[in-house]
Each structure stands twice: as structure tokens, then as C-alpha cells.
Image: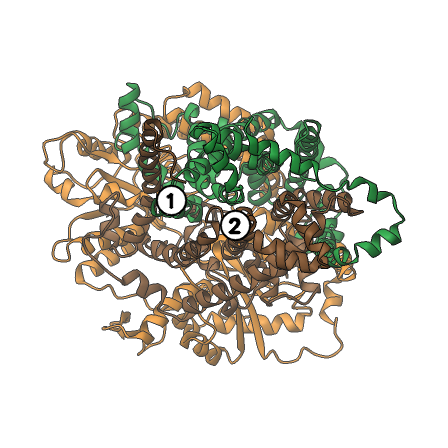
Chain colours: A orange, B brown, C green
Amino acid sequence: MIRRKLSLAAAVVTAAALSLTACSGGDAPAADLTSVSIMAPFLEAQPPGADGAVQKKLEEITGKQVKINWAPNASYEDKTNITLAGSDIPQVMVIQGKSPGFVKNAQAGAFWDLTGKLDKYPNLKTTYPDIQQNASVNGKVYGIFRGRAPMRTAVMFRQDWLDKLGLQPPKTVEDLYKVAKAFTEQDPDGNGKNDTYGITIPKWGALGSNSPYDVIEEWFGAGNRWTERDGKLVPSFETDEFLQADRFIKKMVDEKLINPDFATFDSTKWNEPFFNGKGGIIVDVDSRVSVLINLFKQADPNNFQNKVGFVGNLEGPDGKLHAHPTDGYSGFLAVPKASVRTEAELDKVLEFLNTLNGKDAGILLNNGIEGVNFTVVDGKAAPVKPETDASKAVTTDIKSYAQLGMNVAGNQFYPVKQPTDYEQQVFDKRTDVMAADLKSAVYNPAAPYVSATYVAKGAQLDNIVADARIKYLAGQIDEQGLKDAIKLWDTSGGDKVKEEINKLWQDNK
Amino acid sequence: MKIHNTRGGRVFDAVNYVFLALIGIITLLPFVYVFAGSFATEAEITRRAFFVWPEQFTLGSYEYIFATPAFTRALVTTILVTAVGTLVQLAFTVTMAYPLAKKSLRGRNVILSLVVFAMVFSGGMIPTFLLVKDLGLLNSYWALILPAAINPFSLIIIKNFFQELPAELEESAKMDGATEIGILWRILLPLSKPVLATFALFYAVGIWNDFMSPLLYLSDNSKWTLQMYLRQVTAASDLLGTGNVDPNYIPPEQGIKFAVIVVATLPILIFYPFLQKHFAKGMLIGSVKG
Amino acid sequence: MAAPVVEAEARAANRPPVRERKNGRFSVHFAHYKWLYLLLLPGVVYFAVFRYGPMYGVSIAFKDYVPFLGVNGSPWVGVQNFTDFFANPDFPRLLGNTLILAFLNLGIAFPLTIVLALLLNEVRLSVLKRTVQTLVYIPHFLSWTIVASLSFLLFALDIGPLFQFLNNVMGTNIDFLSDPAWFRPLIVLQDIWKNTGWGTIIFLAALATVDQDQYEAAIIDGAGRFRRVWHITLPAIRSTIIVMLILAIGQMLNTGFEQIYLMTNALNREVADVFDTYVYFVGITQGAYSYSTAVGLFKSLVGIVLIFGTNWLAKRFNQSGLF
């Protein structure tokens, strides 16, 4: 055991030089891969069984025995670390993001550097090189990213309230303020009581976590975590626009247009005020639109249309649209060097992933099995009704199998046909709005870069500013206090983070 | 014990009963809510802040979690592992506690100090994992039982109980020619039923609630215990790993969470009343003497 | 003093003089106790293998641990992690917050467990006793997430039932969830709700071993309810209380992570940050495994000193300690 560790450590030291040796590490060519082991998280209440229909079909499509080791998402990082410390390492590991732990392991040589290796596999060659760059560690691609729709920001509001008050859906942040004010002061539910407010914001911790604060700041032009000013990258919170946006939010807090317990409100209850007619606006990802509609539908299947309205990103005070995108990926599939030892073996594994990312597998992982749980209607996957035990099992399983999908060249599966015409219209509108907003997306220019100082103390540093932001909005500190906190971020290590990020940015330009 | 019919005694009893009944209700209500919620629709859970019975009864959540055989299998597995594990761990603990209760035993203090030390210090997750792997226990249920075979805390308490038992019981048994093992088996264990029941419960709950061991040692999903599922639905969303929550992910509905909690909690709750009869008062020394 | 207590003391004095036996040769001693040593063997092997075998893992605290490189493969950094920890400007605040919470728990939650056990013990109505006993331990099985969401519900600004009740009683308008002054009371309250019932189990087991003859004798002597509790019940479970107290003191820096993390927000973080949440932050969120191990090691050192210290004190005052 110890010896293996030491030899690995030695290998790491000379990793670059060794890569050629590693190619011919074994004299014999890699035996044909008959089985592939994968470690993946599951996010549902339970992982799929090893003998389910999806599993069988997956093995049929890939022609391999596929051994998937599902681990609960709640402790995935622990499981990853323990797996890397052991000797029974899977050939493919789903990595959920560039966590400091992953970066450390990757830089120590735990995973194959796939930079430049993916383009010869047709299904692994990405049509989104920017996102591949975002998912890299300082330009080194340690895995095949799992593509996610980059544009997801939406403003949801009670359509019935809007109609009753004769208002138009908001287009600018100023409109948002007006609608929120009307929702608060003009009795939108018509019960004669002053018991409604505009926007619901839940307790939301970190910076750059797509919180409503981050989104509104970006609309004001503060950028997406980092932004270029005078030829240098600076954190968004060091811009004037950031302060301007927070002043705007504070005004809404002070006028009680936002729930007063925004600092503590339980995020799992986010839908409640909206559904119960207390708070009429939510700023979040557009998929919440469907969740909200479903709630209304469940409560009253005959009258749920026109309860939920939504628009995409809002124009800032400068009259421009700075739309807020995510980084466009959710982790990646990495190949550990300890289990895949030679280039030849790597090639086999990548071929497998190539198949896994093809159309057949893509449909299986995301839609299920045609004829069992869905049929294709107008190019869309329509769920089979009534549900059978077999269809239910497949539908449940694919929620986990979807974790294996990469879709680096766009979605390789059918969009899901919505159960009613109204829901289909909403879904199509969501797609259109997001596509339009994507053109105005302002990305995080520092997404690919990992600063050593940030890895070591970034989470604590960011807390300084994130907490100050909430305290400022709650009226516990004034604007000077917020500025002081931002200074403190700089002096506590932020200056070094800026220096490192800018250097990486310049080097990779 | 009938002699407490003073006025003050009756008032005390009344106040005490009401107070305890209130505490019982306060501790029960949240579980009732969880139980009721597991049969409710998402719309109802969202609309009503608290209820003890749903207006619209649905089995949807249970149908969802029992859609695949995984959950049932995990339930059976957990019950079996807990039963066997509790016996094994209790046996390990009692056999070690008994000699340590003898103050005259040489080396006792050294061993006890090392036990206390091990209670506070541990080598951590990864070295323990490597040990379990080297012992060939990976993917074996023994990996859930043996690494926790003796809880130092339980060991010390059980040892103290043994120490408290009247020495003359043993002395007289020795006169009759009993060996130490015979004394432990025939005299101490029957006398220690409340204590053994207590620690049986502690060990059972420990295994039942253990989430880390199955996570680390069982990579074969079909061997999993219930906590692997429970943890997934009860972990706070921002506790998930590093906060890299997949944006495509829509968290399970509340009702499903509640149903999972009910399925994973009810069996161990039912277990308690069976042990409870061993806590009955006065069955100990008094009865032996009498 | 009531007769039974005297009797108990007499019994203690009658115990065989154990010290004398220690002076013999070891082989004689061993032969005499061979069965006991045999019984001891599985436990000793267990501790050697499963508890001390992995103990080399503490060396992580003195390294820059990378999981992929393993415990032995990661480079040494000496006491760097410790000096970083003590030099951290947050250290005094973390220590203060941790200690205050620890003392609140020891001072309030711990005695309440005993009180509840005694109250339960006084119940003669066996249906009520059994029912309440079963009910009070249910919260132990509900996760902190549930407890937290329950607290959010009860103390919700303006609409929570406890928010309204307490503010009416006190004539205030306090947001308990964000007011730093109310953070600790909330945590202690949650702790009491979740763990007090469960904690009574061990004391109830101890109470079950109390010799019933003593009560009858005391009643004949005319001792009232409270005198019986004071002179018979409490002394009978005194050693259990002391052992539990010593163990609780040894664990006092372990305030738990999940509970506090869930109740922390931007407005109360000043008083909420404790060692355990800090370890989570640096260890999990920032991947500083070695650093968090160093913090854990520091906590363990404090714990062991506290355990041996209080144990020594207990002995000084002629009480039974851990051993």
C-alpha cells in the first residue's frame, strides 16, 4: 500500500516527463475493455438498481459491462477522496465541480490531462469551447464537462396579480421596482388587507452562487463575479455598479417590497409565499416556473393557467441588457490515472465515453426507453400514459442516469413533451426567452482560473463581503461599512487572489 | 409503594403528570407532522404550515420510494445488520467491561487510560478505511459492525455499573466454586438487564443511524442500508458536497422526504417499547435479595 | 441520616481489601485471573487493531495532505497548520463562541436531563410513564435539518407562533432567528428538545438499579418525597452522573456542526462561528484537510486534558471517577 503511494508520488513529481513513458507503460497493448466502472452521484431519494431495464439497455448500447458505483450526492466529496486513497478506483469518475479538493488531487496528478485529446472523438468534441475552457483548471482539461444550459435566469411573478393591477411584465430593473411596489401597496389579492409584498428572497450564503443579489448586481453591470476594468480583472463587488445595485435592493428592503426576513428565510420554503399569495415575485432559475405551475395545477387542475408569469433578464439602469449566465457546466467526467494506466487504455475509455455521449445513449440516459416510458410525438418525448410499473421504474432510474450525460455538443435527446398545451406553451416560451437572453450573456472572465490563495481561503474571504452585503441591506451597517468590508477582503488575502487571477488571465490570453 | 397520599404529594403528582404529558406532546407533534406530510400532496404541504392529518390523502410518496425494490431491500438489510451487529457489539463490550470492573486486575488502569484516549483521539476516516480494506472487509457487512465493536463511552459506563454491583454476590458465588465467566454469565448479566437493554438500544441506534460506514465501505449499492437514502433527502441543500449543486437538479418533493424519514425511523421507534420492559423498576437487586 | 444510607456505606466498607493482592508476582496474579485476562483479550485486540491501528492518521495534521497522494505520500509541513490556526485573527472569537455554547450546554442541558429522568422516575402511573418515555426520545431520530426547519417555522418573523407568543409576553419585536443575542438560547433550546429525552435513558437505567428496600425503609422512617429523592435516589445514581459529567466535559468542544451551520446567517455569524463549523469551512469547502485535522487534534488534546483533569478532581473529592 505504502509503496504504491510512494511510487505514485514519484510519478507525480515527474508527471510531465513521464507522459510518454506512460504511453508504453505496459508492453502488451491494452486488452479490449470488456467492462467499465464509473462512480457517479445520485440526487434522488434512491439510486437505480443494478438490474434495471435502463442498465441493461445501457450495456447493450455500449457493448460493455457497465459497473456504476452510485454515491449519495450529500457526501460525494468524501466518497471521492476515500476512493482516490484506496486501490479500487473506477475508470471514470463524475466530479461535481472545481472544488479545492479536486484541484489539489488533479494538480497532484490523480487524473488524466485530456487537453487536446478529445477532438478526435466525434461525440466528445465540444461545440462550446468556451465552456470547456470554463471547466478547465487554468486551461488544463481534466475531464469532459457535463453541459448545462448556461442561460437560466428568470423573473417569475403572479400573473393574476399583474393582470388585476393592470400592469405590464417588467422589462427593466426600474419596472421590477414598480411591480414590486404595486404588489406591496395596491392589494393585488383584493382581500382589503395590507398583507402582501413584492419579492421573496431566501437566506442565501456565498458570493457568486447565482443568488438574486448576484443576478441584480449583474443586471446593473457589475459583471459576473469578475469583470474587466482598465485592462485588469477585478471582483464584481469592487465596482460602482455593485454598490448601485445594492442601494437599489436596499431601497426595496426599506420600503418593505422584499420579505423582511430575507436574511433567514428558509430556502426550501421559497415557493410558499408565492403559492399562498403573500409574495408575488421570485428571481431564480427558469425551471422554477414549471415547479410553481405544477403546484397550482395540483391544487386546482381546472384553473391553474395564468397564475405564473415570467420574463428573462432585466435591463439595467444604463438601458443595456447584462444577462446573467451560469458557467454552463456542472462538473465533469474525469479519468483517474491509477485505474487507467496507459494511453492505449485511456483511448478505450474515451471511446466508451464517446458512445455514452452519442445519440442512442443520450436518449436512454435522459428520456428513457422508447415504447416503455415514452413515445416520440412531434420530435418530443411524450410520457407513456397510464404509467406501468415498468415505465415508473425507468422514469425513476433515468433521473440518476442523467448524471452521466455530457452533451458537450448540445443536447442529444428529445425535449420532454409537456402534459398540457398551456404547459407546452410556457415551456416553449422559456426556451425562446432564454435563447434570446443568451445573446446578451456576460460571462465570468475568470471562470477557468484557479488561484492558489483562493483555493486556500476563498470561502472565508468571500464570507466577509457576502455577510456585509446582507448586513448593509438589513440596515446594520451603512454603505461605508460595506466598503470597509470590501477593503478587508483585499487586505485579508484578496489582493493576492487578484494578483494571481490577473497573472493567470494574462498568461492565457 | 402506596404511601405518598399527602396533599403535597398529590399536587406534585398532578403537576408532574401534566408537565410530562405536555413534554410528550411537544416531542411527538413534529413527527406527527412528518407522518401526515408523507401522505399529503405537495400543494397541501406548501399551503398549510402545519397539520396533523392531510385533507387530500395520497400514497404517491410511498409509491415513489417503493417504485424499485431497492428501498425494501435496504430496509430488510438494515434490520438484519442492526440485529446481528447489536449482539456482537454488546458481547465485545460486556466481555471487556467485566474484567475492567475488577480494581485488583493488573494493567487495568493502563488499559482504561488507553480506552479513554481512544475515545478522544482517532486516526481519521482514511486510515480507518485503508485498514478495513486491508482486512478484506470492504463490501462486507462486518465493515459496519466490527470497526465500531466497542464504544469506549459505553464500555466505561457498563464497567461502572458492574463495579457498583454488591461484591458479596460474587463472593458467595465464588464460594460455591463458580468461575469468573460463570459469575458474569449467571449472576452479573441477569442483574444488569436494564443496563444491557440501554446499551443494546444505543448500539442498535448507532448501527441504524450510521451513514458514514456504508458510504465508505459498501460500494455495492445493492448492499446499502437505509441511511444512505435517508441522508440524501435530509441533508440541507447547501450542505451538499461543495455547493456544486447541479442546476438541472430539482429537489425531491417534501412529501417524498417525509415518507423516507417515516420509513427509516418507524422501525427503530417500534423497537424501543420491547426493550422498555427491562427498564421496569425494582427488578434488580431488590428482587434478587427478596 | 436515614438508615439505608448507613447500610450502603457499611456494605462498601465490607468489600475485600483489593490493594493487597497487587503485590504478588505477576505469574501468580495472572494464574489467579486467567479467565479475566481471557475475557479481556477480544477487547484489547479490538482497540489495538481498530482504534490504534489507524492512529498514524493524526500525522495528517503535520502534513499538506492530498487524498490522491495518501497519508504517507503527502509532504510534511511541521507545525505550520497549528501556527496558522493559533495566529488566525478569528481564533479568539472561535474559542469564545465554542466555550460559551459548551458551558451553556453543560450548565443547562445536562442538569435538565437528570431532572427529567427524576420526574419520570416519580411517575407511578405506568401507562403515562411508558408513553412519555417513548415519546421524548423521538426527537433524537429527527435530523438537524428537520429541527432547523421546525425552528424556522415556529420563530418565523411576524407569523411564527413562538415569535408572536414570546414577543407578546415580553412586549418586544425581536427577530429571534437573526438577532445575535438570541442565537445561543435558540441553539440550547434545540439541543434540549432534541436530546434531553434521549439522554434520560442512561439515568433511567441507573435508577432502575436503585434498591427498592431503601425506599420502603425511608417511608417507614417518615421521609417525604423530596427527602427520598435527595437522600436515596440521587446518591444511588451519583456515580453515573459523575461519569456522564466527566465524559460530557471531555466532549465539550464538540458543539456539533450541522445544527449550528443550519442556524447561522449573515447577521448572527459573529456569535455562531465555532470550531466545528470552522473545520467544515476550511476542511470541506476549502479542501484544507490537514488544517482541519490540526484543529481537530487541538480539540482532542483539550478534551483529553479535561477528562483526566476532571477525573482526577473527582477522585480528590472521593467520588468514583472513570476508573
Residue A335 visible (yes or no): yes
Asked if residue C210 is positioned above or below residue C221 in the image, the reply reads below
As measured in the structure, the alpha-carbon distance from the residue carrying label 2 to the one carrying label 1 is: 21 Å
User: Image point 52% across, 58% down: which residue?
Assistant: A332
Mark 2 — on which chain does it sit? B
The kind of residue on which mark 1 rests is Lys
Quarter residue A390 falls in: bottom left
Q: Position of residue C238 (x, y in %)?
A: 58, 34
Q: Residue furthest right?
A: C25
Quarter residue A48 falls in: bottom left
Q: Position of residue A52 (x, y in %)?
A: 42, 75
Which quadrant of the figure contains the N terminus of chain A? bottom right
User: Image point 23% across, 42% down: which residue?
Assistant: A274
User: In the shown orientation, is residue A121 left or right of residue C149?
Assistant: right
Q: Which residue is mark 1?
A: C129
* Circle number at residue B287: 2
Mark 1 — on which chain does it sit? C
